[in-house]
Image (cartoon, helix red, strand yellow):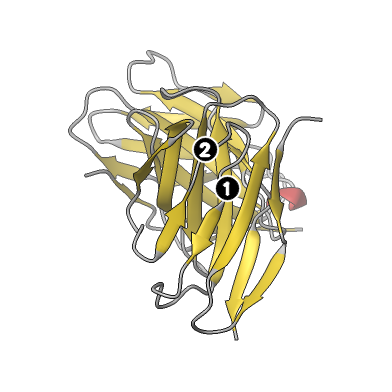
Amino acid sequence: AQKITQTQPGMFVQEKEAVTLDCTYDTSDPSYGLFWYKQPSSGEMIFLIYQGSYDQQNATEGRYSLNFQKARKSANLVISASQLGDSAMYFCAMSRDNDMRFGAGTRLTVKP
Amino acid sequence: DGGITQSPKYLFRKEGQNVTLSCEQNLNHDAMYWYRQDPGQGLRLIYYSQIVNDFQKGDIAEGYSVSREKKESFPLTVTSAQKNPTAFYLCASSIGQRRTRNGYTFGSGTRLTVV
């Protein structure tokens, strides 16, 4: 069974600084995908970034990058130059075929 | 604009009643999903469908039922057998039956409250 663990219930970061949100996962499948989503207070889920298990390079999308350490089964999200609008819940998710499972989430608060 | 529409946004149900949550997409996506989110928690998979007239149970399917008669629609019925239905329900879709780098597209959710 897939298991995704986010150990940080809440994180604070100063505006314009970088922050790392942790995610570890557990699967015996060699092929899988890792995703990060942002959920603002309005409730919608916004897709941020994807990392495939066979991808050789860490994924990047603008200010978001994924620190993928396959041997450690970790897929941490790094947000650079934090903005006040980054305050939200962040969820790590994993998909083997086409059935995505989510972690419990981390609430990020960006302080001015 | 293409997207997923969930309705209603807020829903109140009396104990013992069945209610149906609507999910419609115009993205021409093959696969659709229903998730439940409780306060301060992540999303849990209820049901998913990879093709019309076919669907599979997720991790917490008890007390729920779905149908997939049309590609665009994947309604979720919360039955009276669901002991604690108060939650935020999210519908999602993805382009194909296999994993995609683009992730899922989500609707804006339905907040169900039992009164």
Q: Do the residues labelled 2 and 1 touch (CB within 8 Å)?
A: yes
Let me know if residue A100 appears in the view.
yes
Residue A80's quadrant in the figure? top right
The image shows residue B69, relative to residue A68, as above or below, that is: below
Position of residue A31 in the picture relative to residue A49 (left or right):
left
Residue in the picture at 68% in, 44% down: A82
* Number of the label disc, if any, that sits on residue B24: none
CA neighbours of label 2 inside 10 A, class few (<14), some (14 to 19), many (20+): many
CA neighbours of label 1 inside 10 A, class few (<14), some (14 to 19), many (20+): many
* Number of the label disc, if any, that sits on residue B91: 1
Position of residue A6 in the picture relative to residue B95 (left or right):
left
Q: What element carries label 1?
A: strand
- The residue indicated by pointer 2 is B32
The spot of residue B112 in percent (x, y) is 60, 70
Position of residue A92 in the picture relative to residue B22 (left or right):
left
The spot of residue B115 in percent (x, y) is 60, 86
